[in-house]
Image (tube, rainbow, N blue to C red):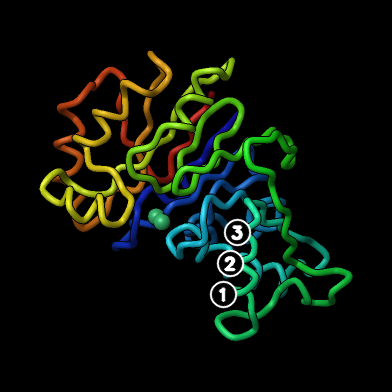
């Protein structure tokens, strides 16, 4: 399984793109950026987008991807998959013909470039070549092979389920703010390095912990604090790099 980091950040900066990963060229895991990271022919190959939650730093790229498909490959479709409240939110607040065109009707309702699929909570579903289990915290999507925790503060259930999973190779976990902004992290449902350190005891042991979603404006400070926790397990994902598990 190949995981390409299209965007590694929890916001945008020069050359720093919001959260998105591309698994085996076909499935997006979050879609904060797409066209800013891959060529048009590569975009056309994408068939599914697993969306952890509807925040713009995880979905803005889906808006432009559907726009690309409508122009250059109207016979293709990307299906955005998530739990029901997230799908409803995307339908109601994003692809609503006000904020952005309703691409589930473009070029026609029968053959549209955007589709939606709703994933059961804590049940397995097939998304492209992947088996996916959604676990609610604030918002998370784990996948067989690796666990992807979307934006979240301290949480439990996903780690309970992850501990029971076989064959996990990596945990992909957010950290957004440096320790001195722990109040902001708590208020907005995010982690600091110190909060991550406390999460580690709940996680499956020994697996590498891949960090994404650091705010680019505060990158250096957050990265230095992360480096002090457990350098043998904790690695900050590099945007543009492909990881194989
Ligand atoms: Zn986010
Ligand atoms: Zn969020």
Q: Position of residue 170 (x, y in %)?
A: 46, 25
Ligand 2 has an atom within 8 Å of the beta carbon of the residue at disc 2: no
Disc 3 versus disc 1: nearer the observer: 3
Q: Residue 165: which quarter of the image?
A: top right
Mark 3 = which residue?
85
- Cα–Cα span, label 3 and label 1: 12 Å
Mark 1 = which residue?
93
Q: Are marks 2 and 3 in contact (CB under 8 Å)?
A: yes
* Within-10-Å neighbours for mark 2: few <14, some 14–19, many 20+: some
- Which quadrant of the rendered structure holds the N terminus? top right
Left or right of 28 in this view: 216: left
Q: Residue 22: which quarter of the image?
A: top right
Q: Where is residue 235 in the image (x, y as percent from the top left)?
A: 31, 29
Q: Are marks 2 and 1 in contact (CB under 8 Å)?
A: yes
Picture layout, residue 223 above or below residue 182: above
* Residue occupying image coordinates x 53% and y 56%: 31
Please tell me which of labels 3 and 1 falls first in the chain.
3
């Amino acid at each position: 399984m190949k995981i390409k980091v299209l965007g590694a950040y929890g916001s945008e900066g020069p050359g720093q793109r919001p959260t998105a990963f591309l698994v085996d060229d076909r499935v997006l895991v979050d879609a904060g950026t797409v066209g800013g990271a891959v060529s048009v022919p590569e975009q056309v190959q994408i068939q599914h987008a697993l969306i952890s939650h509807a925040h713009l730093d995880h979905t803005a790229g889906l808006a432009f991807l559907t726009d690309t498909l409508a122009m250059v490959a109207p016979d293709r479709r990307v299906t955005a998959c998530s739990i029901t409240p997230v799908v409803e939110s995307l339908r109601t607040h994003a692809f609503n013909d006000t904020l952005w065109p309703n691409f589930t009707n473009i070029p026609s309702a029968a053959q549209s470039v955007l589709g939606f699929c709703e994933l059961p909570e804590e049940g397995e579903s097939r998304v492209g070549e992947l088996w996916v289990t959604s676990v609610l915290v604030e918002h998370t999507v784990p996948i067989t092979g690796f666990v992807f925790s979307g934006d979240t503060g301290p949480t439990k259930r996903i780690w309970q389920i992850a501990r029971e999973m076989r064959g996990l190779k990596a945990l992909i976990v957010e950290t957004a703010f440096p320790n001195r902004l722990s109040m902001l992290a708590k208020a907005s449902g995010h982690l600091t390095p110190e909060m991550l350190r406390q999460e580690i005891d709940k996680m499956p042991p020994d697996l590498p912990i891949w960090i994404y979603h650091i705010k680019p404006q505060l990158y250096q400070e957050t990265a230095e604090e992360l480096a002090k926790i457990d350098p043998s397990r904790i690695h900050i994902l590099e945007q543009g790099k492909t990881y194989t598990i």
